[in-house]
Image: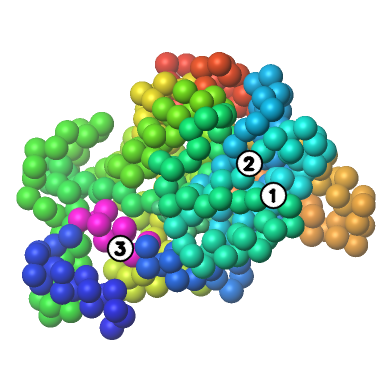
Amino acid sequence: MTALLNFIRETILIDGPISVERYMTLCLARYYGSRDPLGSAGDFTTAPEISQMFGELIGLWMAEIWRLMGEPPRAYWVELGPGRGTLSSDALRAARLLPEFLNGLDVHLVETSPVLRNMQKEVLSGTGKAVEWHDSVRSLPDDGPLLVVANEFFDALPVQQYVADKGQWHQRCVGLAEDEKTLRFGLFPSSGVTLPLPPKEGETCEVPASGIALMGELARRIARQGGVALVIDYGYAGPSYGDSLQALRHHAYADVLSMPGEADLTTHVGFQYLADAAYAGGTITHGLSTQRDFLRQLGIDVRAASLAKAAPAEAEAIFAAAARLTGEGRRNMGELFKVMAVSSPRLPEVPGLARCDANLLRVS
Ligand code: SAH
């Protein structure tokens, strides 16, 4: 039995079942705090790890945002949950094309994992930029525009799950089976909670409370300080019914309850919740778009062709990576992944994404 499983078991024996949200919080802190989860030896792979084009195109998108903002002499480059630091490293390298942009950037990373902070430090040392780390967005600088990117970050935050039973939503919890050893799901007695969807018998509704709070804080800052946040993740506009909680270990699905802290836990991101929080915080929402359409708008095909021309031996791998980032179906990321941006009211349009009417997201 792992130490975390033992801790959770004892907590439940003393205090009773814990919410799925609390369970996720405990598991994710252990999981991300103790390893590098990325790459072929890890549990999952992300877009910046598939190709340098991903980070480069985002770096150039941010440079265009900076131009649209009137080229402020200083701005903050912020990445939430940077993993190995690859996206920021590729983006800042591409930004060398615009020295005035790059020179005025201060780099701030929001990362809780000490293991990944170390990797980020090493990878980003090549950029020649000083890097500052934060445990949360609350300590980010408050005196200049923020250029925030979050790739596969919101899916790694805990969510609340509710299940409809006899006409009411009940929060889903984790308790113990009769053997008092194995974890199993249950429901808390109803607290009469109202959710964006009516309680349809047997259905699940997920509420990303941490993501909502985080997006609210970010949006209030962007509304005040200027700038944008670009969010890329697998998910849906929603809210919609469904239990999307998954465990991933060594690139395969695993049981959510059997190895707490040893598998990655994720949920599909409910973008409308984030858009609502951003709207309430005073920003404008753009999207949703698919990753395929967004990267194509940003010129991934041209970039792939020019990289392939510069390194003909790599051409096949380069085109394969572009296809993985933009392709359809479950094996590719082009349609599964969605893109949303929120911007300061002083920046009413952003490249590559349509401003959304009445703050209602639709995948276009
Ligand atoms: N963006 C990276 C990594 C995604 S994995 C990529 O695309 O490759 C999720 C990242 O978020 C990891 O770096 C993880 O340590 C970090 N993370 C998870 N929960 C966090 C939290 N609550 N606060 C800050 N960082 C967190």
Residue holding disc 3: 26
**Which marked residue is nearer to the observer: mark 2 or mark 3?**
2
**Which marked residue is nearer to the observer: mark 1 or mark 3?**
1
Disc 2 crowd rating (10 Å Cα; few below 14, some 14-19, many 20+) is some
Residue holding disc 1: 129
Q: Which image quadrant is residue 4 in?
A: bottom left
**Residue 17 screen position, x and y as percent:** 13, 62
Q: Amino acid at mark 1?
A: Lys
Secondary structure found at label 1: loop
Distance from Cα at disc 2 to Cα at disc 3: 32 Å
Residue holding disc 2: 106
Dots 2, 1 in contact, CB < 8 A: yes
Disc 3 crowd rating (10 Å Cα; few below 14, some 14-19, many 20+) is some
Disc 1 crowd rating (10 Å Cα; few below 14, some 14-19, many 20+) is some
As displayed, is residue 268 above or below residue 279?
below
Tell me which label, 2 or 3, sits earlier in the chain: 3
Q: Does the rendering let one see residue 167?
A: no
Tell me which residue sits at (73%, 38%) in the image. Answer: 102
Total number of numbered discs in the rendering: 3
Q: Nearer the viewer, residue 60 or 41?
A: 60
